[in-house]
Amino acid sequence: MRYASMITIGFVLAGICVSNFACSRRVLTEPEARLTPSARPTPTVIEHNTPMNWIAVAGRRPFTFNAPPGIVEKPVQGEDSLVGMWQLDDIELSFDYGMYSSTLDEFSSYRGYSRQDVILDGSFAELVQTDDGHMGIVFPRVPAGQKLTMYASYTEPESRDTVKKMLLSIQFAKQP
């Protein structure tokens, strides 16, 4: 946590916004989203900012995330990767942790598509959003050379903020 605070202070001193939801962020346009990560704008550093009454969702995964009480895990079976699914009201949240996880490029033709580079829990990720009730986050490289994609669909517009907070609460298990 001390290391993250030093990074945050450095970004604040440099004049870059690092607050989770309190400021506007530059969102990549479709042509920028296709650039290699080194040619893209500097990613936004995200700090965990979830409500106090939320619970940590863990299990046998190499990461955790926070969610409102009442989230229910659904049984799913993966073929070549670790997968999981949860339901909360109108929100369906799933993840795929493996070498062949989705990049979420399949949403690039959806209305209001945007892709934003972020740093979350010290790892580079891409936050994908549409105006059609889809949002996800892709970590192209996580421990053991794997990729993590967490994706949510929702039908009620007021669920968008809840979904974003869940996706931006991901934390990876620390390696010894």
Image: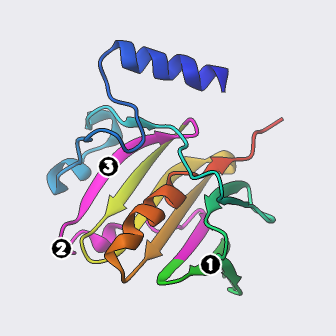
In the structure shown, which secondary structural element does the residue marked by tag 2 occupy? loop
Q: Quadrant of the C terminus?
A: top right
* CA distance separating discs 1 and 3: 24 Å
Q: Amino acid at mark 1?
A: Trp
Residue 92 inside the magenta-drawn segment = no
Residue for point 55% across, 16% down: 6
Image: magenta residue range = 93-122
Which residue is at 78% across, 38% downward? 175
**Real-space Cα distance between discs 1 and 2?**
25 Å
Residue marked by disc 2: 111
Circle 1 residue:
86
Nearest the viewer among 37 and 23 is 23
Decide if residue 81 is in sight here: no
Find residue 63 and report its image quarter. bottom right
- Give the CA separation, mark 2 to mark 3: 16 Å
Mark 3, residue position:
116
Q: Residue 77 versus residue 165: which sits nearer the camera?
A: 165
At mark 3, the secondary structure is strand
Would you identify the image quadrant in which residue 74 lies?
A: bottom right
Disc 2 residue type (three-letter) = Arg
Q: Is residue 9 left or right of residue 1?
A: left
Image coords of residue 29 (percent x, y): 17, 52
Q: Residues within 10 Å of mark 1 (few under 14, many from 20)?
A: some
Q: Which badge, 2 or 3, comes first in the chain's sequence?
A: 2
Location of residue 159 in the rendering, given as x and y in whole percent from the top left corner: 41, 72
User: How many numbered callouts?
Assistant: 3
Q: Crowdedness of circle 2 by 10 Å Cα count: few (<14), some, many (20+)?
A: few
Q: In x, y percent, where is residue 154?
A: 41, 79
Say which residue appears at 36% left-offset and 44% top-offset: 117
Q: Are marks 2 and 3 in contact (CB under 8 Å)?
A: no
The amino acid type, in three-letter code, at marker 3 is: Gln
